[in-house]
Image: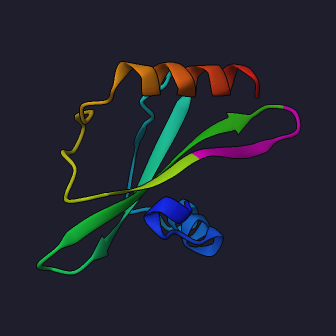
Amino acid sequence: MNQYRLSEKRVLRVLRKAERKEEGIVPETFAQMQTAGTKKHPTEIWIMYILLRKPKGIKIISAWRYPSKSPVGKLPPIPEDTLEELEKMIKYT
């Protein structure tokens, strides 16, 4: 979160008042977005999370700032090693 200058409160705000919700890039995950930045330099703040069964709740897996407007309904190009790392992280939840 520090890399993208995102505070815990900002991430929770995206979770509570998302402008867009989609399936996550890893199976059984979800992603939510809020626009940020300026009209001249728009950005989006994304969070990816998984729903927990016991105890009930959610676990935020990652939070990042997308450098422009992301395509709706399309996955951005994601390196294979990043996908593998995320899948490992989810297995241990």
Which quadrant of the structure image shows residue 18? bottom left
Please give left or right for residue 93 compared with residue 70 in the image. Answer: right
Estimate the x, y position of residue 88 in percent, counting from the top left: 63, 20
Please give left or right for residue 53 compared with residue 9 in the image. Answer: right
Please give left or right for residue 2 compared with residue 93 in the image. Answer: left
Q: How many marks?
A: 0
Estimate the x, y position of residue 7 in percent, counting from the top left: 59, 72
Height in image: 72 above or below 54? below
Camera-nearest residue between 21 and 84: 84
Q: Quadrant of the C terminus?
A: top right
Please tell me which residue is depicted at 32% across the width and 62% down the height of the picture. 44
Residue at the extreme left of the image, as rendered? 40
Magenta span main SS? strand
Please give left or right for residue 53 compared with residue 20 in the image. Answer: right
Please tell me which residue is depicted at 55% across the width and 46% down the height of the picture. 62
Find the magenta span and give its range: 54-61
Estimate the x, y position of residue 24 in percent, counting from the top left: 45, 34
Which quadrant of the structure image shows residue 45? bottom left
Please tell me which residue is depicted at 55% across the width and 64% down the height of the picture. 2
Which quadrant of the structure image shows residue 38? bottom left
Estimate the x, y position of residue 58 in percent, counting from the top left: 71, 45
Residue 59 colored in magenta in the image: yes
Camera-nearest residue between 29 and 3: 3
Residue 55 colored in magenta in the image: yes
Please tell me which residue is depicted at 65% across the width and 27% down the height of the picture. 89
